[in-house]
Image (cartoon, rainbow, N blue to C red):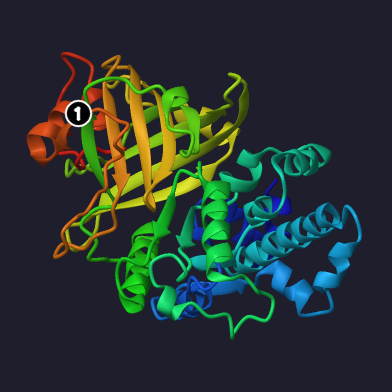
Amino acid sequence: MQAEASSMTEAERNVEEAQNGWTPFHKIVLTGGPCGGKTTALARLSSFLRERGFEVISCPEVYTILASNGLSSGFYTTEGIGEVIQNAVLDVQISLEDSLSNVLKARGKPAVLLCDRGPMDGKAYLSDEKWNKILESRGLSEVDLRDTRYNAVYHMVSAADGAREFYQLDNNTARSESPEEACILDKQTQRCWLGHPHMYVLDNSTDFETKLQRLVNLVAKLVGLPTDLSRRSVKFLLRSKPRAENFPNTINYHVFEVEKVYLLVQDDPGDGSYRFIRKRTIVTREGERKGTVYQLTEARRSGRGELVELKRIITAREYSASYKSRDLSRHIVRQERICFLYEHQSFTVHIYENPAPGLCILHAQVESTRDEKQVVKLPDFLDVERTLVGPDDAMKYGSYALAVIDGASEKNLISPFLSS
């Protein structure tokens, strides 16, 4: 075994270490409607991350590559070619992303792959029947393409929705949508990525520079860099358990089963550091379980005293191995989660099954800084009792605190506020 290890090249060892989580590697998607600011955002993120010591590669939008090399609208006069083209896009997208990921991992340094769109974008251009046929022919599920490949998804809302005076397509010859068509396509693209555990929608409620800075702050938090974001979500207590099937017809949603297991913290400094693994399984409207994604989250105090959370997608085998070091003083948390989009904000309802059966908490995506007021447009079809704020609510309703088994030590209950 030692001979085998010594025969590995430096690059091969680096790839192995990255796959084991020893070297930070993040893969993120920037998506959105036409004229949402993706091109500028990719350039801004690339410079920002490189200046802070990350290796960065941008993976270009595959359809644009094809369109700029001869694929024209005239091709679509051939019946059935839409599925052929989307299959080709998927082939190139997956191969290109995987190849560039390996290049970055081989460098042996903290790295980020910035993807200009991803495989799920293709769903916006096909009927559900045709899209599902493509997935079935490849033996894939949406969980495989959406949840297990990326650490986060950032949707840049088209300027046509909220900043129409700035909507123009002069810098992208592959696009020809009217403002009305752009708004429809933007919402369709949002629905394609709905269900990813870390999806953020960046709307046009601010000027464009502030929109970019919101994105930079979110990515900085993801990769563990200092940021002035106060938090990424606001929580609300619900009076009653919602039923997804009773949501308005205009609301798209996904339902998941979640198992969350807190782990022992080695050399616990007693400062609120924590670790947990999470298993997240999508449940179809027919009750079928259609794919599972596993994640490890570790949080420790930075030199500035901030609690920095780092998340990593792991394999089922890694999940099982980590499970053996679970914190026996805490319950295994089991929930049903319903995620949906409403007014350009991402919401998730956490319905507890164990502990605290029946407890329902609504999590709303908010990416405000410490100086900004957090604005949440609450869905009118949910029965919201009140906002959860402060340490008292954290001790009563946060999953970290709820998980403590009666009689167990509470020395670590200086937890993050209402950890998710």
Count of marks overlaid on the render: 1
Dividing the picture into quadrants, the one containing residue 419 is top left
Whole-percent x and y of residue 18?
56, 56
Q: Residue at the right extreme?
A: 78
Q: Amino acid at mark 1?
A: Tyr
Residue found at x 35% / y 61%: 218
Work out whether residue 27 can be spotted.
no
Whole-percent x and y of residue 394?
15, 35
Residue found at x 56% / y 44%: 147
Work out whether residue 40 can be spotted.
yes
- Looking at the image, residue 115 lies above or below residue 167: above
On screen, residue 190 versus residue 226, left or right, reads right
> Disc 1 marks which residue?
397
- Looking at the image, residue 253 lies above or below residue 180: above
Whole-percent x and y of residue 339?
43, 37
- Looking at the image, residue 264 lies above or below residue 101: above
